[in-house]
Every structure is written in structure tokens, then in C-alpha cells.
Amino acid sequence: MRLMAIDLGDKRTGLAVGDTVTGLVSPAGALLVPIARRGGADLLGAIAQAVDRHGPARLVVGLPLNMDGTEGPRAKAVRAFAQRLASATGLEVDLRDERLTSADADWAMARSGLTHGQKKSRRDALAAAAILRDHLATLGACAQPDRPQTRPIQADPPDSRIDTPA
């Protein structure tokens, strides 16, 4: 099944597409439509056009939770927008925790040689791709997020040693 992830932003909205069969995820650009313009109607229209172009069967929208996992005003606004998006496109919309996806995007571009402006224009689409990779991973799809280790791995932890009889 083809999916499209959406990373909503005040000025730019990142898009990514992926497939549950292959597990492949690709950034699909960013929409330079402010979310506040005409009460979000312009952004809904732009996303609907992207849906027509990419043909997803389902949408995944990044939910900006607070670092402690609670929902603030921004998350509530995204929930409301996601409901409007479902009505506008006729597709089911899943919400996915997007904490640290922009940091993932920044990490991916850290040594890319891109200028600040080039990174800025790609960041939102890469964040959407991270959201979709996380979503596919929870569905058990082939793709696994390519992320750095968050904890060092001990070479030989004490509880993993196997004692052999002498």
C-alpha cells in the first residue's frame, strides 16, 4: 500500500511517500504554503493536489507532541487539521509522533556539503520521510529507520557471557 507522510509547518510542509510492501521511503518535496493562509484552506488544497499526483491510499501526519509525550496547543491544532484533511481527501489519516524528526533530518544533512538555504528547503521533506519510516517500522514493513545508536553497546556485558563447563 502506498502512503504519504506530511510534516506540517507554519511556513513549509514536508511530504514523503513510501510503500508498505517494499518499505522504501522517499522525500517528496515541501509545500511553501503557510498553514494560516485562508484558515488552512490553501494548504489543504495544495496537499490534495499532492495526493492526486502521488496516489497514496492512506496519509500519515506528524503529531508534534511535547518531549514528555503530552499534547500542547500545536498538537491539538494538528489533530484538527488532520480531520479536515481526511474530509478533503477522502483518505484515512494516521497520526504519528514526530518528536526529533527534524533533528534526524538535520543529522542526515550534517556533512552533506549543502548550503544553509539548500538544507532549509530539504529539511521538512526529510522530516516527513523520518515520520513515514517510523510508521512503516511499527507496521512491520521492510524499511527500518537509519538512525544513530542512542546508547553505546558494551563489547561484552556481564549478563551475556556464556560459561562453558571445564
Image: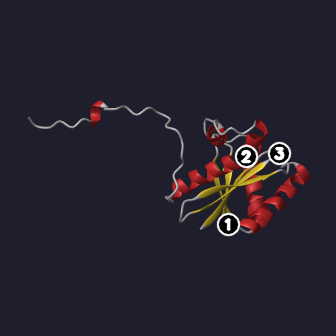
Q: Amino acid at mark 2?
A: Arg
The location of residue 44, given as percent across then percent down, is: 82, 59
Q: Which residue is mark 3?
A: 11
Picture quarter with the C terminus: top left
Picture quarter with the N terminus: bottom right
Disc 2 to disc 3, how far (Cα)? 13 Å
Which residue occupies the foreground of this view, 83 or 158?
158
Disc 1 to disc 2, how far (Cα)? 21 Å
- The label on residue 122 is 2
The location of residue 126, given as percent across then percent down, is: 67, 48
Q: Secondary structure at mark 3?
A: loop
Earlier along the polypeptide chain: callout 3 or callout 1? 3
Earlier along the polypeptide chain: callout 2 or callout 3? 3
Which residue occupies the foreground of this view, 60 or 104?
104
Q: Secondary structure at mark 2?
A: helix
Q: Quadrant of residue 83?
A: bottom right
* Residue 85 in sight from this viewpoint: yes
Q: Secondary structure at mark 1?
A: loop
Q: Which residue is mark 1?
A: 56
Q: Nearer the viewer, mark 1 or mark 2?
A: 2
